[in-house]
Amino acid sequence: MRPSRRAVRAAALAAAAAVATGSLAACGGPVEIDVPKLSAADARACDALSAELPDTLAEQPRVASEPADAPGAAYGDPAIVVRCGVGTPKGFDETASCEDVDGVGYYIPDAAYDDQSLDITATTAGFRPRLEIALPAEYRPNGIAAAMAALAPLVKKHLELVDPCD
């Protein structure tokens, strides 16, 4: 039986998210975190935020990641990956919806709302630099809300609010 267009699209979105956010290395090794090119100011903000990332996120323990100085962290297996300094997510524009969690706006692509079996990526909206939380579908539905709430104080403390979530 041939898969539906929706199933093919979902698989493609999940694969793209895994490539964009890093994945577990073979044999359970460290999680690779992409290091973005950042301005000096953004690098300072991301370094300060990263230094205060918690030991657990969405009830998952922090796991080894590389490079060691990446502006982010990984939690659990499969890994929840937090990255600071990411670019503007595809589909995010002035008309995109914004989820406010404890005073921090996050953009979540519409497809993630429709299909709970998809991995989900939430990106801060209105903050500079941007923070991204890539959460595997196994932790849905509660994991993303828990992660966004846990990270909100760090976002407000270390990142610059340039456009509030409406």
Image (tube, rainbow, N blue to C red):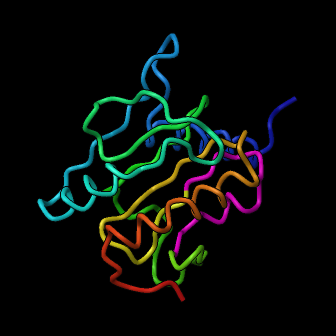
Task: Tell me the magenta residue range.
Answer: 105-121
| Closest to the observer, 161 or 6 | 161
Percent across and percent down for residue 136 are 63, 41
| Closest to the observer, 157 or 92 | 157
Percent across and percent down for residue 25 are 45, 19
Q: Residue at x 27, y 56 (%)?
A: 48
Q: Is residue 109 magenta?
A: yes
Q: Is residue 110 left or right of residue 162?
A: right
Q: Residue at x 64, y 55 (%)?
A: 144
Q: Is residue 17 left or right of residue 43?
A: right
Q: Is residue 74 left or right of residue 142?
A: left
Work out whether 10 lies above or below 32: below
The quadrant the N terminus occupies is: top right
Q: Residue at x 49, y 41 (%)?
A: 55
Percent across and percent down for residue 95 are 53, 83
Name the residue furthest top.
27
Q: Residue at x 39, y 85 (%)?
A: 163
